[in-house]
Image (spheres, helix red, strand yellow):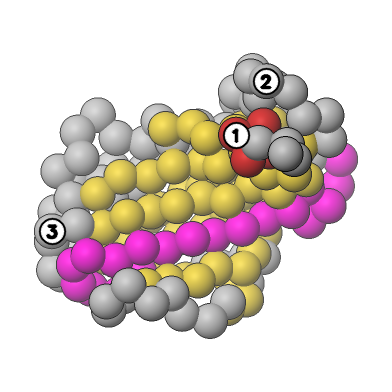
């Protein structure tokens, strides 16, 4: 039997909301996570109820956990806005993309460590509310392809 997927992924509750009733309110940001020990990060947004609220999603490369400096960067994403079929992978510029108004949607954004700006080792997702209407949902950060697989996975918040 091969290595467990549980040692290949490091999954964080994204630290983005105090309540899941209006996830884009206040222009949510995820925790800043270190990619020093990981080759990729995947950010997931799951929208439940709230048919008209939207947000512009960007990914920021950060120099530290404050961040002292953050730079919006290009990334790839895919979305499910109808049923359970995920759409094609789409390239987003550093300006990001706007979520689609509607319910029961999933958005998956990926960034690789070698796509971070300069010598940055940290990354976060930012969702800037563009249509103010409450959206129920949640977010996750999943770090993958660890440089040194471990059980439990290596810490990435500090």
Compute the Cα span from label 3 to label 2: 36 Å
Give SS at disc 3. Answer: loop
* Residue 8 visible (yes or no): yes
In the displayed structure, 147 sits above or below 94; it is: above
**Image mark for residue 151:** 2
**Image mark for residue 48:** none
Give SS at disc 1. Answer: helix
Residue 145 point in image, percent of width and height:
75, 44
* N-term mark: 3 or 2: 3
Q: Give the range drawn in magenta.
A: 99-119
In the displayed structure, 132 sits above or below 155; it is: below
Residue 59 point in image, percent of width and height:
58, 54
* N-term mark: 1 or 3: 1
| Disc 3 target residue | 49
Say which quarter of the image contains residue 99.
bottom left
Compute the Cα span from label 1 to label 3: 30 Å
The residue located at (67%, 55%) in the rendering is 111
Magenta stretch encompasses residue 110: yes
Residue 22 point in image, percent of width and height:
18, 46
| Disc 1 target residue | 6
Q: Which residue lies furthest to the front in this view?
A: 1
């Amino acid at each position: 039997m091969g290595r467990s997927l549980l040692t290949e992924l490091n999954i964080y509750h994204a630290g983005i909301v105090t309540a899941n009733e209006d996830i884009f309110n206040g222009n949510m940001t995820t925790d800043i996570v270190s990619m020093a020990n990981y080759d990729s990060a995947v950010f997931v947004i799951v929208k439940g109820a709230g048919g008209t609220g939207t947000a512009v999603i960007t990914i920021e490369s950060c120099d530290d956990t404050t961040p002292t400096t953050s730079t919006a960067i290009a990334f790839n994403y895919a979305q499910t806005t109808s049923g359970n079929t995920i759409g094609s992978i789409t390239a987003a510029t550093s300006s990001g993309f706007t979520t689609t108004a509607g319910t029961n949607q999933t958005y998956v954004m990926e960034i690789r460590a070698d796509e971070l700006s300069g010598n940055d080792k940290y990354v976060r997702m930012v969702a800037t509310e563009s249509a103010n209407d409450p959206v129920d949902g949640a977010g996750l950060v999943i770090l993958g392809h660890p440089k040194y697989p471990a059980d439990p996975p290596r810490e990435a918040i500090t």
